[in-house]
Image (tube, rainbow, N blue to C red):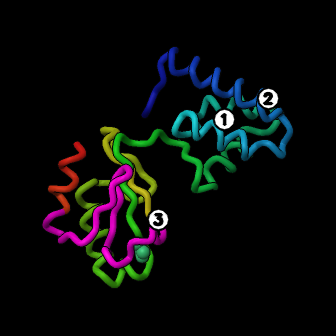
Amino acid sequence: MVTMDRTEDAQVSSVVQETLQIHGTSREELIPVLSEINDKLGHVPTSAMVDVSKAMRLPIGEVYSVASFYKMLRIQPRGKNLVLFCESAPCHVMGGKAMYEKLVAELGIQPGETSADGMWTLVATSCIGVCSDGPVIVINDNIHGNFSLDELPGILTKYK
Ligand code: FES
């Protein structure tokens, strides 16, 4: 379980208040508010959802549903390294399935999850436009393509 200390809590609170001042507290602003909090903090912490639900007078369940529904929003902190795996057809036919299975085994997490040590977050994504290099993964902003299954552990090690 991830816990926040008081400094983090104060930071979250201040970001929420600042964002609500910009957008206001009407129901129509829920997604823009959550989106901006996500951009500023890297995810939408539970305490931010509680603050937003109070300010907008919305049930916490509704705020949580919205925050957890949209792929652009994260309700868990992101790991140190964000690994995007391309799951579109062109990469798939270039060996993407085997790469996916190796990646999941190496990281010990499924898409959408963050490793317990906070090192990795794995996200499955659609085509990122470099299909000729498939199968492709992106770690942080670095594209890795045209590599073999045996090379994957070495690539991951560089980011530890
Ligand atoms: S299908 Fe994977 S990069 Fe285009």
Res. 46 image quadrant = top right
Tell me whether circle 1 and circle 3 mark residues in contact (CB < 8 Å): no
Point out the tag, 2 or 3, that comes first from the N-terminus. 2
Q: Which mark is residue 49?
A: 1
Task: Tell me the quarter of the image containing the C terminus.
Answer: top left
Neighbour class for label 3 at 10 Å: few (<14), some, many (≥20)? some
Is residue 50 something one can see in this rendering? yes
How far across and down, in percent of the image, does residue 60 sit?
A: 72, 38
Q: Residue furthest top?
A: 6
Left or right: 11 in relation to 125? right
Task: Give the answer, above or below, for where 49 lies relative to 93.
Answer: above
Task: Tell me the quarter of the image containing the N terminus.
Answer: top left
Q: Which mark is residue 125?
A: 3
Point out the tag, 1 or 3, that comes first from the N-terminus. 1
- Camera-side residue of 88 and 133: 133
Residue at the disc numbered 2: 55
Q: Amino acid at mark 1?
A: Met
How far across and down, in percent of the image, does residue 85 sit?
A: 38, 64
